């Protein structure tokens, strides 16, 4: 049964520098076609305008949850119960149990405009033995508020995902720099080998292990190092009498 709701203009939320970018927008919203068909057209219009205002792309697809948002590389599923039936509370919890096993990130938004509906929800929540946060239920007073919460949660999860990816990339770069520093320290400890030579060996031969296995001829063929330097490198790694007399600074 379609809900008869009033329409209000959608408003954008904060668009700071930390916003997630997804092909020029914040993400993609996939709406269940069956859920859409149960709602009043004015509410679907509100959703469409709200998503457009906040740079989300809307697609209608036959999915099990009511919504799936892809934001910043993370997918979040939502069940949006827009009409709480106090005479049939079991069905919603059965559906939640079914879907929470399928999605790593899922939220349940429930519209409870009356005290009677709110009391029914509270009784049912504990009757069916819900564990707090598994998944998270969000009671709201009206439809627009419920959808705004859905979009803000999706946006926040996307921002967190992106920031986590940036942090991991930064840590990987730091590890790479540290690894290169250690490499340069080992290679330039070879008498007569400077940073230019070390970089040439890294690009042409590869790791320290690869350099240690390379022959004099292979080093000369793939780098601009002289025969004397190539000879020094092979002796450094293969002649114990030679490499044991030198120490890394």
Image (spheres, rainbow, N blue to C red):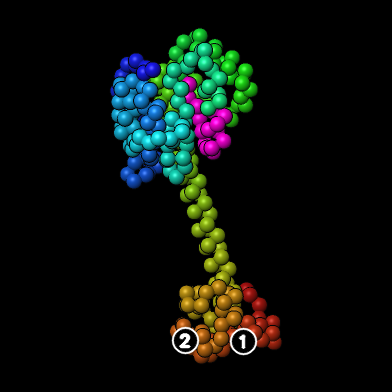
What's drawn in magenta, residue-wise?
96-110
SS of the residue at dot 2? helix
Q: As drawn, which residue projects farthest toward the bottom?
A: 227
Q: Which mark is residue 235?
A: 1
Q: What x and y, as percent, mark residue 196? A: 47, 77
The residues bearing labels 2 and 1 have C-alpha atoms spaced at a distance of 17 Å
Choose the circle earlier in sequence order: 2 or 1.
2
For image coordinates 40% across by 27% down, the residue present is 35
SS of the residue at dot 1? helix
Please say whether residue 22 is visible from this viewpoint. yes
Q: What x and y, as percent, mark residue 143? A: 40, 20
Quadrant housing the C terminus? bottom right
The quadrant holding residue 150 is top left
Q: What x and y, as percent, mark residue 36? A: 36, 27
The answer to whether 249 is drawn above or below residue 233 in the figure is above
Residue 209 or residue 92, whichever sits in front: 92
The quadrant holding residue 189 is bottom right
For image coordinates 50% across by 46% down, the residue present is 164
Per the image, is 119 magenta?
Answer: no
Residue 62 falls left or right of residue 205: left
Quadrant housing the N terminus? top left
């Amino acid at each position: 049964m379609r809900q008869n709701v009033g329409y209000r203009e959608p408003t954008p939320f904060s668009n700071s520098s930390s916003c997630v970018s997804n092909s020029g927008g914040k993400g993609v919203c996939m709406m269940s076609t069956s859920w859409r068909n149960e709602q009043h057209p004015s509410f679907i219009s509100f959703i469409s305008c709200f998503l457009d205002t906040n740079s989300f792309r809307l697609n209608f697809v036959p999915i099990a949850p009511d919504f799936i948002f892809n934001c910043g590389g993370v997918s979040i599923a939502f069940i949006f119960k827009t009409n709480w039936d106090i005479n049939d509370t079991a069905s919603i919890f059965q559906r939640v149990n079914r879907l929470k096993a399928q999605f790593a990130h899922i939220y349940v938004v429930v519209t409870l405009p009356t005290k009677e509906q709110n009391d029914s929800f509270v009784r049912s929540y504990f009757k069916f033995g819900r564990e707090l946060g598994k998944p998270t239920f969000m009671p709201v007073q009206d439809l627009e508020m419920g959808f705004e919460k859905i979009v803000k949660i999706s946006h926040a999860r996307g921002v967190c995902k992106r920031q986590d990816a940036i942090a991991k990339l930064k840590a990987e770069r730091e590890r790479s720099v540290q690894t290169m520093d250690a490499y340069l320290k080992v290679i330039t400890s070879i008498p007569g080998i400077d940073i230019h030579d070390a970089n040439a060996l890294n690009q042409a031969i590869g790791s320290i292990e690869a350099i240690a296995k390379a022959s004099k001829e292979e080093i000369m063929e793939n780098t601009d190092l002289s025969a004397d330097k190539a000879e020094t490198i092979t002796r450094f790694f293969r002649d114990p009498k030679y490499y044991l007399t030198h120490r890394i600074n």
